[in-house]
Amino acid sequence: QKVKLLAERLADVDLVIWVDADIAWTTPEADLGALFLRQLSTRAACVGHMGQPRWESIAGNAAESASGGEIFLWASADVRPKQQRNMNLNSAVIALRSGAEARRFLAAVWAEGEDLYGFTKYNPSWQKQLVGHHYWGWPFEQGGVWTVLERDSALLERTCVVEVGILHSVEYHRWRLNGPLGAHMPGMSSADRRKAACRHLSASVRFGHCAETLRQCPDLFTGRLLAAHAQGLCAHCLAPAEVVGQDPSEPSGEVASRRQDANVSDWSLFDCSCLQAA
C-alpha cells in the first residue's frame, strides 16, 4: 500500500517522505525540507551516483536546469551498479514534491502492480524462494518505480538519485554515526531488527535526551500517548539524573516540579530492556 498511501497524502503537503519500516531513523533533528528542496536539488547531489551508463546520462539532469524543470523525486542509489537488468536505485526512502508529476508517477507505478507477476522480470529466480520469505515478491513496488522511470525519461530527468549513504545506509553494516539519516536493515530477522533498533534507541536516550527522543515517536497514537508520560517512563527505566537535567538558568522550583511529574505514573510492569540496551 506504500504507493497508494503516498498518493493519498500528496494534496496535504508540499513534500511527502516515505521511510520503510525496516529503517531505524537516526537523525530526528534533520531539517528535511531544507535537505531535499535545497541541499539535494543541485547537479552535484543528483547526478553521477548510479554507476550505470544506461541511465546515468539522464537521471537528475533537471537539477539546476535553465529549462525551469524541478526535481520531483528523490531516492538513494543502490550498491549494485554492475547489474544490467535492474536500475541501481533503492526506494526504501523516497521524497516526492507534490504536483502533477508526482501524481502521474505514482499512478503509473500503481498500474504496474496490476500484473501480479510483473516483478519476475527483475527476479528470474523468484520460484526458488518460499512463499512468505522476506524477499518473496522482490523487488516489490521498487520494480514498478524502475519500470516507470526507464520508460519515461522526462520523469527520470527530474529524479535525484542521491549518493549511497546519505538518505539511508542501504545495507546495515554501512551505517555510521553522523552518516546516513537512517540505518537500513534489509533481510534481517525480526529479532535482529529489534535488537538493532533498540541499540539505536538506547544511544539516543543517553545524556538526558530520553524524553525528547520518545516524544518524537513517529507512530501517531504512541507518540501522543508518550508525550504526556515520557518523563515518567524515562525516570523508571533510567537513572533520574540522566532524565531530568537542570539548566543553570532554570529556577530550582521548576526543576523540582518536573522531577515530581516524572514519577507520577506507575511503570512497574514496563519492560525497559530496549531503552537500556546500550
Image: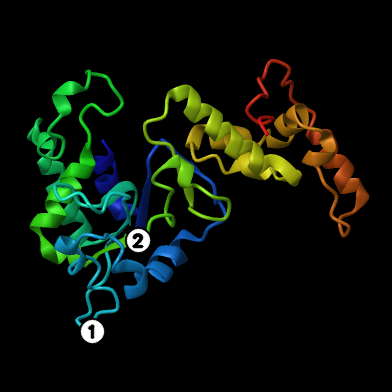
Horizontal arrangement in the rendering, residue 106 relative to residue 24 (left or right): left
Q: Give the quarter of the figure containing the N terminus.
A: top left
The residue carrying pointer 1 sits among few (fewer than 14), some (14 to 19) or many (20 or more) residues within 10 Å by Cα, namely: few
Q: Secondary structure at mark 1?
A: loop
* Number of numbered discs visible in the structure rendering: 2
Q: Nearer the viewer, residue 2 or 224?
A: 2
Q: Give the quarter of the figure containing the C terminus.
A: top right
Labels 2 and 1: the sequence-earlier one = 1
Circle 2 is placed at which residue position?
162
Q: Nearer the viewer, residue 67 or 184?
A: 184
Q: Residue furthest bottom?
A: 66
In the rendered view, would you say 183 is above or below 164?
Answer: above
Disc 1 marks a residue whose amino acid type is Ala
Provide residue 81's location: percent of width, then percent of height: 26, 54
Residue 210 visible somewhere in the drawing:
no
Q: Which mark is residue 66?
A: 1
Which residue is painted at 23% across and 84% down in the image? Answer: 66
Provide residue 64's location: percent of width, then percent of height: 29, 78
